[in-house]
């Protein structure tokens, strides 16, 4: 994989990637995997071995050894850096109690209290001493009840892991059972179009064997056996015959139990096995008349020079866990997570911290740059000001300075006069716009104007004239009223009418706009 460019690194800082790595914790190793959200290719993988007895049956016995392994893992993932990305973690199934509850389907109801009440009845651990989370699985079309997956894990089991994470500065966004990680693989990597089948999943791993039954992403049955609990493995060696005997015994128990409690038979299965996969798969299919569903997992470990690499089945749980971190947006992640705060709250806290840290650095760097630039500009301006000031002082002492000062006074006096003339001009009203229509309409109406009175301080125009008749005077008034652009009102007082030798004398008052 090529190294990212400086520009890509800068973009990753401004817009953090949405892929989050997976951290699978087992008895023998801590494994890290980051898949690309675009094509599910492996972007990073590393694994650190744990000393014997550090974790026994899912319980952390040696916190110091586990912390050392996490610190070593961080160095391998991010050399020279103090922290790795927030991650999705899984623990052995033995640390969890998983149950599917059915409650009446009530539209727009809040199920939180109802789920907690029913979870307390089925949980083997008091909820006050446990971390609990639940996931809405939807309505069961057969029973018409709403189903909920409830996950419960004892605090005494989980807290030592969280304390170890805290000591090395690592932040888990979600913590789930390895069984859920395995169940997730079917939806993404199964090579069948039948996605709604009831499925038995068998995973032969480093720590033991997982048996689970699921349907449509729902975990219906979960059972885990550590190698220390299996009689055939007590001598430290496991042969093909041992594995076939184990599978014959345990698969029969599971199928009978599931058929009895769920009124449904399992007909399909998936087998994850790092060795003897073909032989063991054929054995299970033949013994129980089950159909094996093919699953093609991505290769996690690159082949060595000889072309050899561990089978991807060895990391089946890790791959399923990584799908949650790479493909499911954090804000949409409603899958169960047994942490002190739920997945969304943990992600918001992580995003807020990263956002505040990033932009505080950007603001500080920006302010530092602005301050440095301001100081540089101030120094240059101050230097230029001193130079100009020196030139002015030298010029003021020259003989021509008195002549220039006198010219400046004359120019100021002239500018003052021009300003006053401008103000006077603004105060003079242009009369032609008002008098022209009055004179023209008087001529058209055969009215003799004897006198016109206007004033710069009054908006009124007064006109005295002689009309052939009183009606002509009123017609003249009506015509002037039509000049709305010039006059706001035109009036002919009745008291102004009188009969003269040349006709009817009157006075007209027009208010100019």
Image (cartoon, helix red, strand yellow):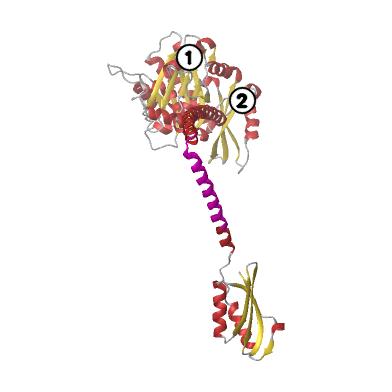
Q: In the rendered image, which quarter is residue 294 located in?
A: top left
Decide if residue 83 is on the left or right side of residue 244. right
* Viewer-proximal residue among 206 and 10: 10
The furthest residue to the bottom: 501
Query: To which residue does mark 1 refer?
Result: 71
Q: Choose the circle earlier in sequence order: 1 or 2.
A: 1
Could you classify mark 1 by the number of other residues whose Cα lies within 10 Å: few (under 14), some (14-19), or many (20 or more)?
many
Examine the rendered structure and indicate whether residue 182 appears above or below residue 26: below
The furthest residue to the right: 495
Given contact means CB atoms under 8 Å apart, are the residues at marks 1 and 2 in contact?
no
Examine the rendered structure and indicate whether residue 6 appears above or below residue 108: above
Indicate whether residue 417 is drawn in magenta. Answer: yes
Q: Quadrant of the C terminus?
A: bottom right
Mark 1–mark 2 distance (CA, rounded to whole Å): 35 Å
Q: Position of residue 406 (x, y in %)?
A: 52, 45
Q: Tell me where the magenta segment starts and ends, as one range.
A: 397-420
Q: Is residue 289 visible?
A: no
* Viewer-proximal residue among 97 and 301: 301
The furthest residue to the left: 306
Magenta segment, prevailing SS (helix, strand or loop): helix
Q: Is residue 95 visible?
A: yes
- Residue 123's disc is 2
Decide if residue 2 is on the left or right side of residue 60. left
Q: Position of residue 109 (x, y in %)?
A: 62, 41
Indicate whether residue 201 is drawn in magenta. Answer: no
Q: Position of residue 239 (x, y in %)?
A: 38, 13
Residue at position x 57%, y 56% in the image: 420
């Amino acid at each position: 994989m090529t190294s990212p460019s400086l520009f890509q690194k800068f973009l990753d800082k401004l817009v953090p990637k949405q892929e989050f790595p997976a951290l699978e914790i087992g008895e023998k190793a801590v494994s890290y995997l980051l898949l690309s959200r675009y094509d599910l290719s492996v972007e990073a993988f590393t694994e650190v071995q744990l000393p014997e007895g550090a974790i026994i049956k899912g319980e952390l016995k040696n916190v110091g050894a586990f912390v050392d392994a996490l610190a070593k893992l961080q160095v391998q993932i991010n050399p020279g850096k103090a922290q790795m990305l927030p991650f999705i973690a899984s623990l052995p199934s033995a640390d969890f109690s998983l149950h599917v509850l059915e409650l009446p389907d009530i539209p727009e109801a809040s199920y939180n209290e109802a789920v907690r009440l029913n979870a307390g009845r089925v949980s083997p651990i008091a909820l006050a001493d446990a971390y609990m989370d639940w996931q809405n699985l939807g309505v069961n079309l057969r029973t018409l009840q709403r189903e909920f997956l409830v996950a419960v894990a004892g605090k005494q089991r989980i807290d030592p892991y969280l304390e170890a994470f805290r000591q090395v500065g690592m932040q888990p966004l979600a913590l789930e059972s390895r069984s859920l990680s395995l169940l997730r693989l079917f939806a993404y990597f199964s090579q069948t179009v039948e996605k709604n089948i009831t499925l038995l999943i068998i995973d032969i791993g480093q720590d033991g064997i997982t048996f689970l039954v699921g349907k449509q992403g729902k975990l219906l049955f979960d059972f885990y056996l550590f190698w220390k609990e299996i009689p055939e493995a007590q001598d430290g060696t496991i042969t093909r015959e041992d594995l076939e005997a184990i599978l014959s015994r345990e698969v029969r128990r599971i199928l009978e139990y599931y058929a009895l409690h769920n009124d449904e038979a399992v007909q399909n299965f998936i087998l994850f096995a790092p060795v003897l996969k073909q032989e063991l798969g054929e054995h299970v299919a033949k013994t129980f008349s089950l159909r094996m569903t093919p699953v093609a997992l991505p290769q996690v470990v690159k082949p060595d020079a000889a072309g050899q690499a561990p089978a991807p089945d060895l990391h089946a749980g890790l791959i399923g866990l990584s799908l949650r971190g790479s493909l499911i947006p954090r804000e949409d992640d409603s899958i169960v997570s047994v942490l002190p705060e739920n997945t969304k709250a943990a992600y918001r806290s992580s995003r807020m911290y990263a956002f505040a840290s990033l932009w505080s650095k950007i603001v500080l760097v920006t302010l530092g740059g602005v301050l440095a630039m301001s100081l540089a500009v101030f120094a240059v301006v101050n230097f230029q000001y001193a130079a100009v000031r020196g030139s002015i002082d030298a010029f003021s002492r020259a003989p021509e300075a008195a002549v220039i000062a006198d010219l400046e006074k004359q120019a100021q006096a002239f500018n003052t006069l021009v300003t006053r003339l401008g103000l006077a001009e603004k105060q003079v009203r242009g009369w032609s716009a008002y008098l022209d229509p009055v004179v023209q309409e008087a001529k058209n109406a055969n009215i003799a104007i004897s006198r016109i009175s206007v004033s710069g301080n009054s908006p009124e125009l007064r006109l005295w004239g002689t009309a052939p008749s009183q009606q002509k005077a009123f017609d003249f008034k009506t015509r002037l009223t039509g000049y709305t652009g010039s006059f706001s009102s035109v009036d002919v007082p009745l008291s102004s009418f009188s009969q003269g030798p040349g006709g009817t004398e009157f006075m007209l008052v027009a208010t100019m706009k």
